[in-house]
Amino acid sequence: DAKTTQPNSMESNEEEPVHLPCNHSTISGTDYIHWYRQLPSQGPEYVIHGLTSNVNNRMASLAIAEDRKSSTLILHRATLRDAAVYYCILREPLNTGTASKLTFGTGTRLQVTL
Amino acid sequence: NAGVTQTPKFQVLKTGQSMTLQCAQDMNHEYMSWYRQDPGMGLRLIHYSVGAGITDQGEVPNGYNVSRSTTEDFPLRLLSAAPSQTSVYFCASQPGQLYNEQFFGPGTRLTVL
């Protein structure tokens, strides 16, 4: 399985943008890049996903490098409620029968301060 | 909708005891999964189900059994608890094969003495 590498931790000030990097140099051509986050004492929640193009939703933006070997999750204005562990996950296409399987690494712990 | 619910929230077992962790979802999702999360680690897949009557093993299935008799419920059974099974257990569901988002429950914190 293709692996991802993320920094163990990052810090941000409230209301500033946060860029969370993820390296995935062995990504296959059909793997999707998914991001989940886990707030303290909660289960993970889906944030965003993409394949090649940059993606935006109400929670975040995902910037994917042209060679797809890295990506960056962007929180445009961090709040205290964004303090969580963020996981970058590679996922095979949904029609391959592996749709239930998410492989989590250790993620990046984001600390947000006033 | 209540989403994905798990019971109990906390459980302490003695080595060798058996128990069942309950998971239910009211969203009519086809896919359900069980993960465990050890301290400081990411989640690892134990078992998953792509529909009622169909289950398969994930990354760390040993010591656990599952069954899926209804769409709503996906219980996880620990046959003979061991200290190595001390962990937080998360259940997740997904509408079907062609959906990207998995929905996770709040977790069950299990301690095996």
Image (cartoon, coloured by chain):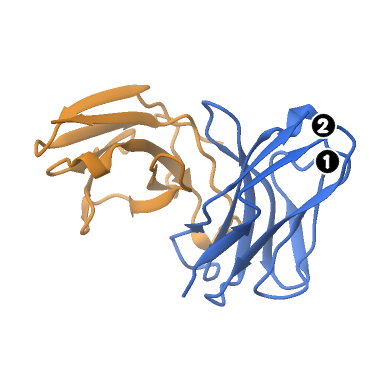
Chain colours: A orange, B blue
**Camera-nearest residue between A114 and A76:** A114
- For the residues tagged 2 and 1, is the chain the same? yes
Any part of residue A97 in sight: no
Q: Is residue B72 above or below residue B63?
A: below
**Residue ID at (41%, 52%):** A45
Q: Which residue is mark 1?
A: B63
Q: Position of residue B69 (x, y in %)?
A: 78, 73
What label sits on residue B4 in the rendered view?
Answer: none
Q: Secondary structure at mark 1?
A: loop
Residues tagged 2 and 1 counted as in contact (Cβ below 8 A) = yes
User: Comparing marks 2 and 1, which lies closer to the viewer?
Assistant: 2
Give the letter of the chain under mark 1: B
Q: Position of residue B54 (x, y in %)?
A: 76, 67
Earlier sequence position, callout 2 versus callout 1: 1
For this orientation, the residue located farthest to the top is A8
Kind of residue indicated by mark 2: Ala
B51 displayed left or right of B93: right
- In whole angstroms, how far apart are the C-alphas of marks 2 and 1? 9 Å
Q: Position of residue A9 (x, y in %)?
A: 33, 23
Q: Secondary structure at mark 2?
A: loop
Any part of residue B42 in sight: yes
Kind of residue indicated by mark 1: Gly
Which quadrant: the C terminus of chain B? top right
Q: Which residue is mark 2?
A: B82
**Residue ID at (22%, 58%):** A57
Q: Is residue B10 above or below residue B33?
A: above
Give the letter of the chain under mark 2: B
Callout 2: few (<14), some (14-19), or many (20+) C-alpha neighbours within 10 Å? some
